[in-house]
Each structure stands twice: as structure tokens, then as C-alpha cells.
Image: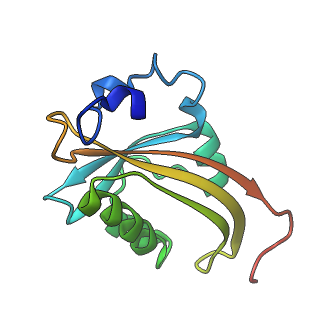
Amino acid sequence: WENARGSKHMPSRADMSPRVMSGLLRNAVLIRVIDSGAEFEFRIVGDAIVQAQGASLQGMTMAEIDLVLPGYGSLLHNAYSNTYRKRAPFAYRGWYVREADGRAMFHESLVMPLGDDGETVDHILVVGVYAMQPGATLR
């Protein structure tokens, strides 16, 4: 990401092509920014992310995710809004128990803005590693 952005605030989506990220694709999510950051949509979701989430959320907005997993879409929306507003990458890590279904996971995630003009965020790239704790649920 740093190398691809050069002197710009952020690299473009094209700068972070599948060829450039071939070793990370299973752990990557590409998110489209909608209405100047009012909403976000999962466009591409890697296999490792689908396994960690327990379902494919590809094509869903954060509001739609909240309908299926109450509160989870809002949590993700907050993280993506932070990256959108600040136009800077953020790293998150720690245990998370999703209250909607009791799924427990440890994650390390890097959330990075992308923009065709190097200034305006139009996509967000997330690369994450998840470890599931067998049997760890709230229910």
C-alpha cells in the first residue's frame, strides 16, 4: 500500500490489483464506498474471510448485514467510516464475539483507503487474518 501510493494520500484500486496482491487474495475484502461514505458494500470477499465470517457477505451493504447479523454491519460501518474520513489506513486486532450468533474470533485487520485520484476514497481494501476459537460462543 505504501509503495503503491507514492506521494499521493492513497493508491488507486488499479494499483492494488490481484496480481500485486496474489498472496493476500484469500484474506482480502474490497469494499465500495457509496454516497460519500454514507454506506459501504462488500464487492469482493476472499475465501479465508468467508470462512471466518461463517457466510459470504459479498454484495451486501452494512445495512443489509445488520438485518442478518444485528449490530455487526454497524460495527463494520464505523471502522470503514473512520478510514474514509481520515483517508488513512488503520490496523485493528483483538477478540470479537459477534452477539447476533455468538461467533468468537481473534482478528488482525488492516483497513486501507483506495482512490482513483489519490485523494478521494472510492474503495476500501481490508486484509485480515482470523483465528476461530472452537466452542467459544455466547449461546
Q: Quarter holding the C terminus?
A: bottom right
Q: Residue at x 19, y 55 (%)?
A: 34
Q: Is residue 101 left or right of residue 6?
A: right
Q: Quadrant of residue 123?
A: top left
Q: Is residue 107 above or below residue 46?
A: below
Q: Residue 98's x, y, as percent?
A: 61, 74
Q: Quadrant of the N terminus?
A: top left
State which quadrant residue 62 falls in.
bottom left
Picture colour scheme: rainbow
Q: Judge whether 46 appears above or below 104 on screen.
A: above
Q: Is residue 132 left or right of residue 121?
A: right
Does residue 46 lie above or below 73 as drawn?
A: above
The residue lying toward the viewer, choosing from 53 and 82, is 82
Residue 67 visible (yes or no): no
Residue found at the very far right of the displayed protein: 135
Number of marks drawn: 0
Q: Going 67% across and 67% down the picture, which residue do you hit?
A: 94
Residue 132, image quadrant: bottom right
Q: Residue furthest front?
A: 7
**In percent of the image, x 21 and y 61: which residue is there?**
37
Can residue 76 be seen? yes
Residue 120 in percent (x, y) is at: 16, 46
Q: Position of residue 119 (x, y in %)?
A: 16, 43
Along the line of sight, the residue nearer the viewer: 118 or 104: 118
At x 69%, y 76%, the residue is: 102
Q: Residue furthest top?
A: 19
Task: State the image coordinates of residue 42 (x, y, percent, origin top left).
Answer: 38, 49
